[in-house]
Amino acid sequence: MNLSYQQMLELASSGLRAAGIGEKAAHETAQFLALAELDGLASHGLARVSQYAGHAKNGRIELAPKIKVRPFKASAALVDACDGLAFPALRFATDLSVNLASKTGVGLVAVTNSHHFGVAGHFTEAAARAGYISLLFGNTPAAMPMVGGSKAIFGTNPLAAAFPVASRDPLVIDMSLSAVARGKLLVAAKKGESIPEGWALTADGKPTTDPNEGLKGLMVPLGGDKGALLALIVELLVVGLSGSRFSYEADSFFDAKGNRPRIGQLLLAIDSGLAGSQVFANKMQALLKTLALDSGTRVPGQRRFKQRASGFKEGVNVSDVVVEEIQAGIRQSWDV
């Protein structure tokens, strides 16, 4: 079904409100889910509405949280998402990191008692458009083993980085530390499709092409042992600085019932003028010119921005299964 951004926004917001989520949290979350669809990232788009709604109905999130902030020295702060959906807290934390960096050169903001935060690159992109280098790390419910292990210890622990480019879209790098984002398994499961071998393992460690078995089992780390070690770095940074739960302490996002995940995120904004006001900008331009000489090179983020522009103009084809799932939840709320 082809939907405009406004239609996706209204559908997602209505679906979240139907589950009892507060108006502000529902609207801000819906904005990011609709943006993910525009960017061609359906695994973090409207397919998440029913997931979040299930968490709301089963007490896994606070429906209308009031974000709390604890300043720490001049350039750092801790934001408490208070068990709510992560998007309002991450939007606030992004703005705060930029504000701190504008005053001290660096802004470090940790987010605790948080939830699934969607496309990591959306937050770093916002900071880069304000002129700051931005990094974001987050842990997620356990899905990957440690090197040599067979039990889920780390999440897919995504990370993103964005770099401002004068008079152009920023350069955005966004990735999970599993071979693919776990949300791709969710989308495949909803569509009744298989997944390529090498994405996931069953609970007993065997390769699988069944997304449902993969969701119950393990994700394959990106690049093998190196991906697991990067996940370890993210885990220690996020949990150690935010005080959030370890990945293995948070129940899966893909189960409606379970504990409040209380995972964390870490944002870093950096003023790029350390070596001089134009040094970073000039170095970025020099690099982009060099990359342009190599035909076929794709600058990170550019495909996403191109797709976004097309989506705003022509709409986005959203899975009929996903749309019906959301609409069914809305109808159910009317019958209660």
Image (cartoon, helix red, strand yellow):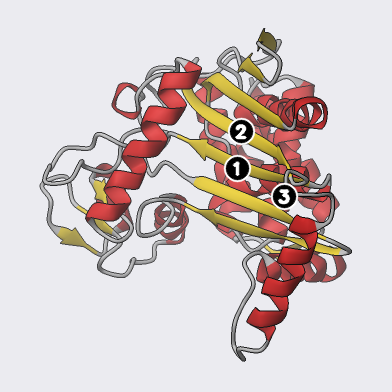
Residue shown at the point (45%, 57%) measured from the top left: 184
Q: Earlier in the sequence, mark 2 or mark 3?
A: 3
* Secondary structure state at the residue bearing disc 3: helix
Neighbourhood count class around disc 2 (C-alpha, 10 Å): few under 14, some 14–19, many 20 upward: many
Measured in 3D between alpha carbons, the distance from the residue under mark 3 to the one under mark 1, in whole angstroms, is 10 Å
Looking at the rendered structure, the kind of residue marked 1 is Leu
* Quadrant for the C terminus in the image: top right
Rendered location of residue 28, percent (x, y): 76, 33
Measured in 3D between alpha carbons, the distance from the residue under mark 2 to the one under mark 3, in whole angstroms, is 12 Å
The label nearer to you, 3 versus 1, is 1
Q: Which residue is mark 3?
A: 125
Neighbourhood count class around disc 1 (C-alpha, 10 Å): few under 14, some 14–19, many 20 upward: many
Q: Earlier in the sequence, mark 1 or mark 2?
A: 1
Q: Is residue 307 left or right of residue 322?
A: right
Q: Tell me if I can see residue 23 in this picture.
A: yes
Q: Which residue is mark 2?
A: 267
Q: Which residue is mark 1?
A: 135
Looking at the rendered structure, the kind of residue marked 2 is Leu
Measured in 3D between alpha carbons, the distance from the residue under mark 1 to the one under mark 2, in whole angstroms, is 6 Å
Is residue 77 depicted above or below 182 in this figure? above
Looking at the rendered structure, the kind of residue marked 3 is Glu
Q: Is residue 207 left or right of residue 34?
A: left
Q: Which mark is residue 213?
A: none
Neighbourhood count class around disc 3 (C-alpha, 10 Å): few under 14, some 14–19, many 20 upward: many
In the depicted view, which residue is nearer to us: 152 or 314?
152
Rendered location of residue 283, percent (x, y): 72, 65
Dot 1 and dot 2 residues touching (CB under 8 Å):
yes
* Secondary structure state at the residue bearing disc 2: strand
Rendered location of residue 163, percent (x, y): 70, 54
